[in-house]
Image: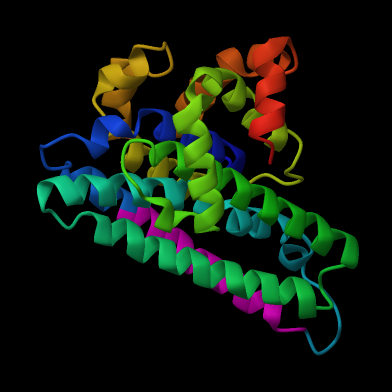
Amino acid sequence: MQARDLVELAALVAQNGHLVMTHGAPLPAPCLERYWTGSKCRLDRWGRALKRLSEIPADGHLPDELRNSVGVLEEIVTGDVLGRVWAGVVTAHDRRTGEDAGSIARTILMGQHEAQNRAMSLLVNSPLIDGASAQRLDRLRRRAECWSDLLVGFLSVTEDVTEFGADSQRARDFSEDFREDGTRAWSLMFASLRASFATAFERQSPDADLNGEIAAGVILCFQPEVFDSTGLLRPLWISRLQHTTNETQVMIDSLFSDERNERIAEANVGDEGEFVRRRFTC
């Protein structure tokens, strides 16, 4: 599963997050564990990759894995979009149920922040990363933060979780906009998010297997009919996600691919398209 797909999944989770936030039953422990394990393993991989990037070879020769490090940096600078949204959803659920499932999501989010800080330091200081790549990755980071705040703001219409925004005040501003009249433009805004990240990534994600595990841990906390009602995720896929990781990438691709081009086109037409550009631009 690619980093871009995780950003799109974050939007779907924000759209349906109220179903978990207001649900009184405990979240499934195996799903939370799957999110935790996949996220921790990915953080470990990120840590090793960042360590290698910080160690300049004495002979000045750059191994291929360092030359191809852009993919992991793209994962890191966008990885907390889903992390912030999911932490907000689970924390809001805890407030209603008295559970502490949110501590898992918050701990992972803290690890993602640490990795992102290390990555940004490399963008500024490492001679292994050229200036153009550093600028592009920083723009990608800022775009991801803006969309994080928008999605957290959407969640906060149900319950205030703006603390999980990259900029909590911006998340509150988005939430106020949504309370006024923004929810009517959600489908076009979703298309705008897809278009925003459609060409933003230069490399395949090196941790696609763990990205799939993280996605599965989140998706399985929802009832199957949540995504099936919109034709995005069918019960057979849920069953497969519960028992195997090998087909996760194919299933997640299907989750998004059917409407991608159509919705991107729709985002640029009509009065609501103009409304999205005017009020919810990242």
**Residue at image coords 34%, 34%:** 17
**Residue at image coords 60%, 26%:** 189
Residue extending furthest front? 180
Left or right: 10 with respect to 57? left
Q: Is residue 54 magenta?
A: yes
Image coordinates of residue 56 in percent, x first then y, are: 76, 84
Looking at the rendering, which quadrant does residue 248 occupy? Answer: top left
**Residue at image coords 34%, 65%:** 107
How many numbered discs sit on the rendered protein? 0
Image coordinates of residue 188 in percent, x first then y, are: 61, 20
Q: Is residue 42 magenta?
A: yes
Q: Which residues are magenta?
A: 36-56
Image coordinates of residue 8 in percent, x first then y, are: 54, 34
Q: Is residue 221 visible?
A: no
**Residue at image coords 70%, 84%:** 55
Is the magenta region chiefly helix, strand or loop?
helix
Quadrant the C terminus occupies = top right
Vertical side of 259 occupied by 98: above or below: below
Vertical side of 86 occupied by 259: above or below: above
